[in-house]
Amino acid sequence: MVGKNSSNLPPGFRFHPTDEELIMCYLRNQATSRPCPVSIIPEVDIYKFDPWQLPEKAEFGENEWYFFTPRDRKYPNGVRPNRAAVSGYWKATGTDKSIYSGSKYVGVKKALVFYTGRPPKGIKTDWIMHEYRLNEPRSQPNKQNGSMRLDDWVLCRIYKKKNTTRSVEQKEQEDWGAQTLTADDASGSQTFKFPRPCSINNLWELDCLGSISQLLNDNAYNSSFDGNFNRPMEKLELGEMSYQYPDSVKLQMNQSSSLNQQNFLNPVFEFQ
């Protein structure tokens, strides 16, 4: 979404004014019918459009767009502005920010969020508006004449907030889709997905290695590993606990002469 960039602007031109500059150099000039430093802020009644329609109405901008817009009253005898748009409404959020030029109070900045639907059951969107208005007192003739106009001009900055939650979910999906593990059981073949940095604990959480009781089952194990898996199975006693291992488990036995203690190594656990 890119605005209609003016051909009169010099190459490399960027428009990033401060809050004070927007009030003093642009909004005040617009309100007093004086020319602005650069004519890139169009006059658009933004409440006659939805926010996603506004970028094409802008004169300049790629990620944020500026507009001079009037404000109307919600009720004939009130001072509340009418925030209704085509398919939703703008709702104020947070507290107003006072804008100063030096030590002088010159304006107010208000943040608003666009909701689709009708209040109070509207659906919040990612569209944000910063509304700048002057601190000068409003003239009353229009109100006495029955006009619904509240302010002749306010300055609005419109942009769409980036959805960070969606980016995090996409990254997690990429990490989990990196590797797969296929295991065969009695019911058939099952495929498991696990992240790239996969440990033994990850595999157990995914039920890919089975439980400890399945690994340490009631079969026998080979007392020493010498490459021959056809030897008879033997049984190892560890105190009051006895564990028997199948032929497929690699086992290493070490005899310590000083401690008179047996050490053996399992691909998953190491007992000593």
Image (cartoon, rainbow, N blue to C red):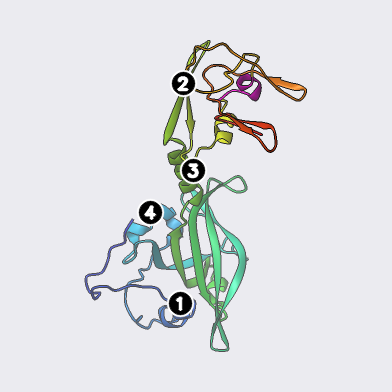
Which residue extends farthest right?
240
Q: Amino acid at mark 1?
A: Thr
Q: Residues within 10 Å of mark 3 (few under 14, many from 20)?
A: few
Mark 1–mark 4 CB contact (< 8 Å): no
Nearer to us of marks 2 and 3 is 2
First reached walking from the N terminus: tag 2 or tag 3: 3
Q: Residues within 10 Å of mark 1 (few under 14, many from 20)?
A: few
Q: Residues within 10 Å of mark 2 (few under 14, many from 20)?
A: few
Would you say 175 lies left or right of 268 here? left
User: Residue at (68%, 32%) from the top-left corner?
Assistant: 261
Say which residue label 1 marks.
Answer: 18
Across and down, in percent, residue 109 comes to 54, 72
Would you say 213 lies left or right of 102 here? right
- Which image quarter holds the C terminus? top right
Check if residue 210 falls in the magenta segment: yes
In the rendered view, would you say 131 is above or below 214?
A: below
Q: CA distance from mark 2 to mark 1?
A: 77 Å
First reached walking from the N terminus: tag 3 or tag 1: 1
**Which range is magenta?**
209-216
Secondary structure, mark 4, is helix
User: Residue at (42%, 76%) from the top-left corner?
Assistant: 17
- Which image quarter holds the N terminus? bottom left
Q: Amino acid at mark 4?
A: Gln
First reached walking from the N terminus: tag 1 or tag 4: 1
* Residue 252 location, quadrant: top right
Say which residue label 3 marks.
Answer: 169
Q: CA distance from mark 2 to mark 3?
A: 47 Å
Return the mark for residue 227.
2
